[in-house]
Image: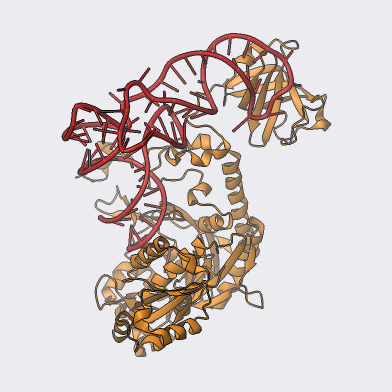
Amino acid sequence: MLRTHTCGELNNSHTGQRVSLAGWVHHRRDHGGIIFIDLRDRYGLTQVKFDPSKTGIWENADKLRSEWVIKVTGSVVARPENTTNKKLETGEIEIEADELEVLNKSKTLPFELKENIEEVNEAIRLKYRFIDLRRPELQSLLRLKDKYIQHIRDYFHEKDFTEIQTPILANSSPEGARDFLVPSRLHEGKFYALPQAPQQFKQLLMVGGLDKYFQIAPCFRDEDPRMDRHYGEFYQLDMEMSFVSQEDVFEIMEPLMIGLTEKFSSKKIVNLEKDGRFRKLPWREALTRYGSDKPDLRFEMEIKPVTELVKDCGFAVFTQAVQNGGVVHALKVEGGSEFTRKEIDNLTEIAKSKDAKGLAYISIKQNEISSPIVKFLGDELTQKLIKELEAKFGDIIFFAADEWKIACLSLGAVRNECANMLGLKDNTKAAWCWIVDFPMYSYSEIEHGRIDFEHNPFSMPQGGLQALNQKDPLEILAYQYDLVLNGFEASSGAIRNHDPEIMYKAFEIAGYSKEEVDAQFGALIRAFEFGAPPHGGNAPGIDRILMVLSDLDSIRDIYAFPKDGKGKDLMMDSPSEVTEKQLKELNIKIR
RNA sequence: GGAUCCGUAGCGAAAUUGGUUAUCGCGCCUCCCUGUCACGGAGGAGAUUGCCGGUUCGAGUCCGGUCGGGUCCGCCA
């Protein structure tokens, strides 16, 4: 061993001991005679003293520079009175060094390891990630994540789940995100795909009788990144259970999420039902009342339909929307009359980004009502609306008039931004909820008039085969559920469709022939013909949940080696070109 | 694919309406200093202002293009 102790453990009780420490030169203070070195390792900082009168190694100590790696040996001595450092765990003592070994030198760092490092350009920190990782903040996040994953594993093992690794070289799947393709050398012209999720494998495990499965599963998707979405690869807590209902899945997941919240954040869990369970919000209700399928329930600010009130009013924007089968929804924002013209313009842009044509409002100021639409509505209706929304002086009411979904989503985006502006997103709170009863189908956004799966084609439709045969497809709900935390989608899951007959019918409604289903989901369908148990599960995005629980701005902070915003690894310089020989073996030509 | 913001020493920033030698802090190098802990003091090096072109007597500043980056929308369990 190069060291007898770490840089974080020595104190007054060790005085007189002869010790060896190894670490990085964190800071050097050269007083001409005496030289102090703050020696740093994962565990802390220890001050090392080189005194020219007491040692022959002073000359070498004089040459030390930041981030050199050294080993020092000497005795632990109590610091003289008034020179202790209360900010340091080891501040009562110092090492009086008599041996110094330089283990490695360091060039001058490309950026300083200082408190305000967040201000340093992220690209340069990513390129030198191995230096950034020396910061205690990043190290403690990685250790936090380790404990977090251990907690999850312990929880499922205790519940008698089995962790099973599923293949990384899998098949391209037609639904969902873009795949990462891996060319096959042994089979010319064929490709593996990295799994977007172990979805089909875990269902096949259920058919295989494994009963309770989980996995901290790597998932790969070639979609553009976001602050809360790491490019390319991320981890899901994938889990699946046999012979269960939706409620059984909830009962397994909720105590885990409560445990993670309590153990890995200081947030207070709010918005629980009286019996301590998570609130369940039907999808349609969530969209109507909060304008989102992942509503932030740390604050109320509810949206109300006012279609009936305004359908015959004098404002053509409202009446035409209603005549076209649409709705008019209203959002009261308490304190919103303070919004400036510029801020309202910005909110209008946000509404428009969700396909709204505009954003009407009634601002109730102290002595007047300020609104571009009151002259069309008339005083009487204006007062009715104000009463309906229970608006007071100081409030503002926003309106969306459009087809139902656009009205919901545009006001939902406005609701979200208003909460930001008014500081309503309280980071001391954790609001968990389930969104349930997702629709099985919706109209395709690409092909007009065509019916497509709204969410996941593997979900069991509520009402089973009978519903598929008899109901309007757009009315059919699925046993499908999302878990939401503070406005972030934390997980999604479903009770799966395990019956081949129902499966073919479900796909038929979405326009897939039996042959197409067999071609694309052959393994799964075949398996279901051999005694598949009813099963269901879900797959929380564990990185994102930890990010929200830890109040991190960026998901990159909890990856040791993250990709940048364009999907590049600046440190390894990937993706990169490969040799002609490699391409030839794989029968690939670059255009 | 679209919108928007940003590129000035190693890092972070400044530079009146376009004006002459591009400024400051940190870091780096040299020297001085025996109790500091963000040590202190003196001096020094370090920049084709991302790149290309244009307007102008004159461009870090204005215009066009391009490259790189951030965030958002689209997309995405």
Specify the farthest residue to the front.
A367
With A499 as the anchor, is A584 left or right in this view?
left
Q: Quadrant of the C terminus of chain A?
A: top left
**Residue found at x 26% / y 70%:** A446
Observer-nearest residue: B9 or A491? B9
**Residue found at x 42% / y 67%:** A413
With A538 as the anchor, is A152 left or right in this view?
right
Please name the color used to draw chain A: orange
Determine whether A241 is above or below A234 in the image.
below
Determine whether A477 is above or below A58 in the image.
below
Total residue callouts: 0
Determine whether A501 is above or below A97 in the image.
below
**Residue found at x 57% / y 62%:** A162
Q: Position of residue A418 (x, y in %)?
A: 48, 65
Judging from the image, what is the letter of the chain drawn in red? B
Question: Where is residue A278, by image quadrant?
Answer: bottom right
Question: Where is residue A307, by image quadrant?
Answer: bottom left
Q: According to the image, what is the colour scheme of the structure?
A: by chain
**Residue found at x 63% / y 56%:** A264
